[in-house]
Image (tube, helix red, strand yellow):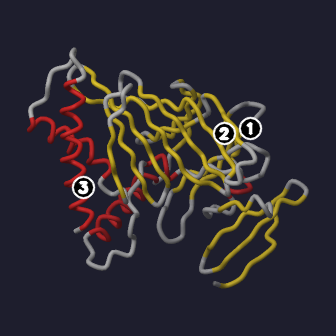
Amino acid sequence: MQKRYNRIWAVLLWAVLLTGCAEHTDAEPMLTETEQVTESTVLLETTESFTSVNTEQNPDETLCVNEDSIYGSRRTTYGWKQGELVPVRLRDEYWRHGSTVTDTYEYAQDGQKILVQREIRETDGNRSEIIEYPLYFHILPDTVQVLQNAEIVQELELGSFWESYAALGAYFEQQMESPTMPLEGAYLREPEQYLGTEDYDFDGHWDLYIPDTMQGECVGNYYRFSPETGRFEQWDELNAIGFEMYTDPENGTLNAYTGGEFRRWEWQDGGLVLTDEASR
């Protein structure tokens, strides 16, 4: 109930901010109060599951929306286009193995998101790396597009991802309606955020895992990034295992929970070796 009240207040605050923004945009028409609230509600539909939402006016852009969740934070900048508010820029911040990753997207005229910069900062502040126009992904009905600066670099086959994504969405919806919500702050994220992008062989390049299932025994397909070709290649060794694995860069291991057991693998002489297996 408290989340619902917070969302209502966010909508009302947004309507007030939109009025101020329209007054400072002489070339754009003033929205009526009803249009402002309707527009605000539409924009908030994608953020209603975030743990907190707040808006602010920006002297340079029309409106900025800051969103916080258990997964990280996002800041979306909206601007006027032919009398409508449209997203202009997205700053997506999340955590990965002791580092904070900030992805900056810009929106093309057709609404497509283009990843223009990735910043990786160690939490201790000792190192920061900035990558201009890194690779990113877009999931279509049958394929995963690998893109760079809006150009398609590669297309990969997609298995049963969408069926699993729909089932996960139904699960979240069911849990949201439960009076004893066990997934406080969790929500169904964008499809691309369920792709596994980790450095599975610790060579300094993020590889790719495309899940076929996202609940229970999670399985999928692995692709190794080849710095020589700049493309993702089928990874037979990891695909022979198939289970979703998580990297432990500090110890140089791959970990997974499969069949009720914890398993750990290490790379030895170029091959993957199972080094630990124990019941949960």
Horizontal relation, residue 265 to residue 259: left or right: right
Q: Amino acid at mark 1?
A: Ser
Q: Amino acid at mark 3?
A: Arg
Q: Which mark is residue 226?
A: 1
N-terminal label among 3 and 1 = 3
Helix, strand or loop at label 1? It is strand
Horizontal relation, residue 91 to residue 101: left or right: left
Q: Quadrant of the N terminus?
A: bottom left
Residue at x-position 43% and y-position 39%: 140
Residue indicated by mark 3:
7
Please state which of the two labelled residues, at mark 3 or mark 1, is closer to the viewer. Answer: 3
Residue at x-position 26% and y-position 41%: 43
Label 3–label 2 contact, CB within 8 A: no
- Residue 106: x and y in percent read 46, 29
Q: CA distance from mark 3 to mark 2?
A: 41 Å
Q: Residues within 10 Å of mark 1 (few under 14, many from 20)?
A: some
